[in-house]
Amino acid sequence: MLPAMVLCLFGRVLFYMDTTEKILEIKVPFTKGSLSFRAQAELLLQRGLVCNDKEQLIDSLRHYNYYRLSGYCLSFEQSRHQFLPGVTFEDLAAAYEFDRKLRKIVMESLELIEIQLRTSVAYQLAEGYEPFAHEKRAYLHIGEEEFKKWLELIHSTAIDSKEIFVRHFKKKYTDFPRLPIWILVEILSFGALSHLFSYLKKVDQKIISKQFGIPLTIFQNWLHHFAYLRNICAHHSRLFDKTFSIKPRSFHSDPKDFPPGKIVFSLLTIRSILRAQCFPQPVVREWRRKIEDLFANPPHINNFYEVVGSPVLGDAWLDSSFWK
């Protein structure tokens, strides 16, 4: 960026031009047309993709959507829209399948964490205070305006719910749309649940985070990241090479080889939480085995472990003390 410029003549300022202001990009109308599945396949082949069965490629595009599949092309390109020599359609398909399996396994672990958090929050509020503690500011740490928004959210969630147990409560009790906390936690989104945790008093937060074996300040950040991670998986978005905008904070003495913005670091945070005894350990061991089996057969991508977030240790990250 050029510095601000001042033009002087005989000691007098003639004009001042501030060139430090950001130059705005000129927008243009979108004029691209759509392409048939056959034309999409032709475009990939023109960009250097190797494919021995063009009809299979066309059939795959009918299923995957070109725009989704094009995201997986990035890891196989030497320059934008130009594949590395020898990259095959099977390579793209393998990367897509690896990512699909990864999303599924990550969702399994997030489900374990989410269910345990629902149980822990409900129990802490109900046993520590009363069944409707989440409806009273006296039991929470929350501002007045935020509290009003919170009540609007949980009441609208109850009204919109189609769950049988919610309809039963509505039919039998006059309190509706107020729900006792052990019912409410079952219909809150993961994001809303993490917000509720942030509204709890510090003493209650510490009791819950201790059950997970993670310091409170780290635990709060991880819940935010897990809600974000769950959203990525739920929308079937690309995961294995994504750089996360909401990153988990580093835990004590974490290895520098794992950047927090990549999936490997997220897997390590999940593994750290799942060590807690509140989780069924046989299920946790099976989850860990699935991850290890998946990473034992990665797609054929140059610098794969750098892409997923382990640039130094490579496939040895599974043998690190942070995973075992």
Image (cartoon, helix red, strand yellow):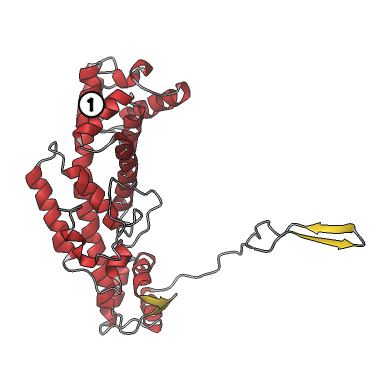
Q: Is residue 270 visible?
A: yes
Q: Nearer the viewer, residue 49 or 8?
A: 8
Tell me where residue 3 sits by quadrant. bottom right
Residue 32, compared with residue 83, is above or below; it is: above
Tell me where residue 126 sits by quadrant. top left
Tell me where residue 48 sits by quadrant. bottom left
Which residue is pictured at 31% across the width and 66% down the height?
306
Residue 277, compared with residue 169, is above or below; it is: below
Image coordinates of residue 127 in percent, x first then y, are: 20, 19
Image coordinates of residue 62 in percent, x first then y, are: 31, 69
Most extreme residue toward the right, as rendered? 10
Q: Secondary structure at mark 1?
A: helix
Residue 174, compared with residue 94, is above or below; it is: above
Most extreme residue toward the left, as rendered? 282
Mark 1 neighbour density, 10 Å: few (under 14) some (14–19) many (20 or more): many
Which residue is pictured at 43% across the width and 27% down the height?
149
Q: Is residue 286 left or right of residue 33?
A: left
Q: Nearer the viewer, residue 226 or 33?
A: 226
Image coordinates of residue 169 in percent, x first then y, are: 22, 22
Q: Quadrant of the N terminus?
A: bottom right
Image coordinates of residue 34 in percent, x first then y, are: 45, 70
Q: Is residue 246 left or right of residue 271?
A: right
Residue type beneath disc 1? Ala
Residue 42, compared with residue 120, is above or below; it is: below
Q: What residue is shown with label 1?
A: 122
Q: Is residue 59 left or right of residue 247?
A: left
